[in-house]
Amino acid sequence: MKFRERLDSTLYWILVGLMAFMVLNVLWQVGSRFILRSPSSFTDELARFLLIWVSLLGASYVTGKKMHLAIDILPSKLEGKKQRKLNVLINVLVAVFSLFAMVWGGIKLVYITLTLNQTSAALNVPLGYVYLVVPLSGLIIIYYSIMNLTERPEDPVELGKEIA
């Protein structure tokens, strides 16, 4: 199994697990508030942190699957080399943004919050661990962007079979 396939599978199952955990957490929050009449103090914060991780890891996953939301007016009007050049430009811009905003900025964010010993209010978790997903997702997006640049264009016939 290739590294990309293992990464896809690992991200998929991490996302499934995080989503399941988030659903259980929110169900407990609702149940403790309305059934037990004693709202849980940590569930709101935990749901927020889980949503951060699901969002950023999900963005990484869909980058690898080429399923990100996109405005495709221009790419759909282009063909051949022009479409390929636009695809290269888009992947390079995504990788550069991920490098500077997510990896570099994320590492600085994690370092600062860990250095200042910032912790969350209810869970008392160091916020640097919560923000660790930013540079991690950035690295994964860069990897997928590079892989998207280096792989051959897909055969339209095979692509049609995959969609159907």
Image (spheres, rainbow, N blue to C red):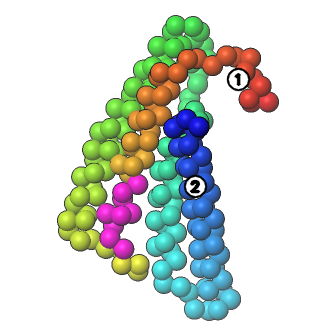
Q: Amino acid at mark 2?
A: Leu
Task: Mark 2: give few (<14), some (14-19) or many (20+) Cα within 10 Å.
Answer: some
Query: Which residues are the magenta region?
Result: 125-133
As drawn, 35 above or below 119: below
Quadrant of the snapshot with the C terminus: top right
Q: Is the stretch drawn in magenta largely helix, strand or loop?
A: helix
Q: Earlier in the sequence, mark 1 or mark 2?
A: 2
Locate residue 69, reporting x and y percent: 57, 36
Q: Secondary structure at mark 2?
A: helix
Residue depicted at 57% across the width and 55% down the height: 15
- Distance between the Cα atoms at labels 1 and 2? 25 Å
- Which residue is outermost to the front? 1
Identify the residue position indicated by label 1 in the image. 159
Q: Is residue 97 above or below residue 49?
A: above
> How far across and how far down the image is residue 136, in percent?
39, 49
Q: Given contact means CB atoms under 8 Å apart, are the residues at marks 1 and 2 in contact?
A: no
Give me the residue at 49% from left, 43% from top: 60
Q: Which image quadrant is residue 128 in? A: bottom left
Q: Which residue is mark 2?
A: 15
Residue drawn at (56%, 56%), measured in percent from left and top?
Answer: 14
The residue that appears at 39% across and 28% down in the rendered structure is 93
- Which kind of residue does numbered mark 1 sit on? Leu
In the rendered structure, find residue 49 and report the number of the disc placed on it. Answer: none
For the residue pair 27 and 17, the one nearer the viewer reads as 17
